[in-house]
């Protein structure tokens, strides 16, 4: 499982491909593991919604589109399929969605909000 860590001092984000222990440090402090969230409790919607397309899948961030403002937006959407990782970076002003051409099978979908952290679908 890919782990995502964030430095609360400078905002650096690191993805660990093969966790094996130890402590990640940035700006002289341990980085914080970003826990996956699966249920929205506020007005913003973060849980990825997956739709099948003719060539793969479309991932939207949430059932009501997530804001994509300068100070609050989805930074990336990723799909994990077996040993493959597909990532689409996003910027403020873009739609909070991405399309992926992925093989059929079990997928894990995650997205990262610059304010509210890491989110995943319930699959």
Image (spheres, rainbow, N blue to C red):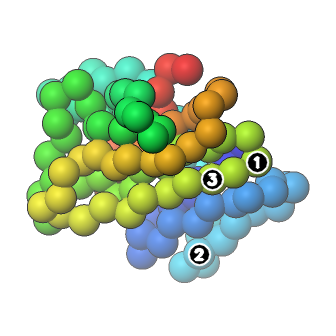
Apparent side of residue 38 relative to residue 22 in the rendered image (left or right): left
Residue highlighted by disc 2: 26
Image quadrant for the C terminus? top right
The residue shown at (65%, 27%) is: 106
Apparent side of residue 112 relative to residue 27 in the rendered image (left or right): left
N-term mark: 1 or 2:
2
* Residue 94 screen position, x and y as percent: 18, 58
Q: Quadrant of residue 60?
A: top left
Q: Quadrant of residue 105?
A: top right
Relative vertical location of residue 50 with respect to residue 4 in this rendering, above or below: above
Residue highlighted by disc 1: 83
* Residue 62 screen position, x and y as percent: 26, 31
Mark carried by residue 85 = 3
- Mark nearer the viewer, 1 or 2: 1
Apparent side of residue 2 relative to residue 110 in the rendered image (left or right): right
N-term mark: 2 or 3:
2
């Amino acid at each position: 499982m890919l782990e995502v860590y964030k430095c609360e001092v400078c905002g650096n984000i690191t993805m660990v491909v093969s966790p094996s222990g130890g402590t990640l440090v940035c700006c002289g402090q341990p980085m914080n593991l970003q826990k996956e969230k699966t249920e929205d409790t506020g007005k913003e919607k973060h849980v990825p919604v997956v739709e099948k397309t003719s060539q793969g899948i479309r991932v939207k961030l949430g059932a009501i589109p997530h804001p994509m403002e300068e100070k609050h937006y989805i930074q990336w959407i990723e799909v994990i399929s077996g040993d493959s990782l597909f990532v689409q970076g996003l910027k403020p002003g873009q739609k909070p969605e991405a399309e992926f051409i992925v093989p059929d099978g079990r997928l894990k979908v995650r997205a990262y909000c610059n304010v509210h952290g890491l989110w995943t679908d319930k699959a």
